[in-house]
Image: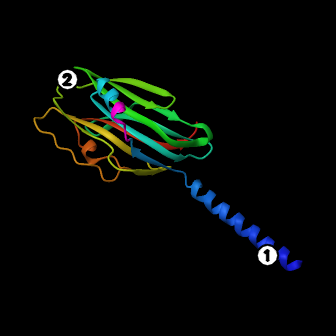
Amino acid sequence: MKRIMVLLGVALLLTACGIEESGGAKGENSLVIEPADLSEREQMIVNQMGVDYQTFYTLDGEVKEGEVLETSIDVYENGEGRSVISSVSNPDDNEFNQSLHSFQLLMEEKEAFLTLGEPSGYARGTEFFPDDLGSFSFVSLEDKVTMKKGEPVYLAYLVGTSQNELSTEVNENKTALPKTVQEAEYAVVFKLEIKNEQ
C-alpha cells in the first residue's frame, strides 16, 4: 500500500510539473501576428472602400492579466517621432483567437485619414501632410511575426519624400524602427506593443 501511495504521489508531482511548464510557456506572453488571408469576396469589399493603403492581419495568443495590446500610428518627420492615434485591446480572458485587425490610410490632397480596426470597432485620426511631398512608398507585413512584451513590432509604414526618387528597404527586424523611417523626410508608422494596463 505504501508503494502505491508513493507511486501515486510521484505521478501527481510529475503532472503538476507538466502543468506548471505549460503555464510557464504561456507566461512568456507572446502573440503571433500573421497577414490575414482574405477571401475573394472580402478582398472585393476592401477594394470598394476606396482606401489607399491597408494592412489586414490576425492575432493569435494571449497577454497576461494586467497587460494590454496597444496599437498606434506614429508620424516621423526627419527622424523626430510623434504619436497620432492609439488604441488598446484587451479581449475576453486576455486571449486573441485569430482575431482580425487592420490599419488603413486614406489620402486626400492635403490630409490623410488613419484608421485602426479591431473586432470590437475602430479608432480614427487625421494627419496633415507637408505641402511638398510628391512620392510615397508603402511597406507592409508579409510574414508571420511573434511579438513579446517589451519589443514593439513595426508592422507597416508609409514613407514620403519631396524628391523625384524614393527607395525603401524591407525591414527584416520588425522589432526595430526601420532605417528607412529614421532617414525619411516623412513617414507614417503602424506599431504594436504589449504594455501594462494603466
Please give the name of the residue rendered at 24% of the width and 45% of the height, measured from the top-left corner: 180
Q: Is residue 111 left or right of residue 32?
A: left
Above or below for 186 versus 110: below
Are the residues tagged 1 and 2 within 8 Å (C-beta)? no
SS at badge 2: loop
Looking at this view, is 154 or 55 the one in front?
A: 55
Q: Residue furthest top?
A: 109
Please give the name of the residue rendered at 37% of the width and 33% of the height, measured from the top-left corner: 103
x and y, in percent, of residue 109 in the image? 22, 20
x and y, in percent, of residue 35 in the image? 37, 43
Quarter holding the C terminus? top right
Quarter holding the N terminus? bottom right
User: Label 1, label 2: how many angstroms apart (C-alpha)?
Assistant: 77 Å
Residue extent of the magenta highlight: 37-42
Q: How is the image coloured?
A: rainbow
Quarter of the figure with residue 129: top left
Residue type of the residue flagged with mark 1: Leu
Magenta region includes residue 151: no
x and y, in percent, of residue 6 in the image? 82, 76
Q: Residue furthest bottom?
A: 3
Residue type of the residue flagged with mark 2: Asp
Quarter of the figure with residue 134: top left
Foreground tag (1 vs 2): 1
Q: Sequence-wise, which precedes: disc 1 or disc 2? A: 1
Local packing at callout 2 (Cα closer than 10 Å; few below 14, some 14-19, many 20+) is few
Q: Which residue is mark 1?
A: 7
Q: Which residue is mark 2?
A: 131
x and y, in percent, of residue 114 in the image? 35, 27
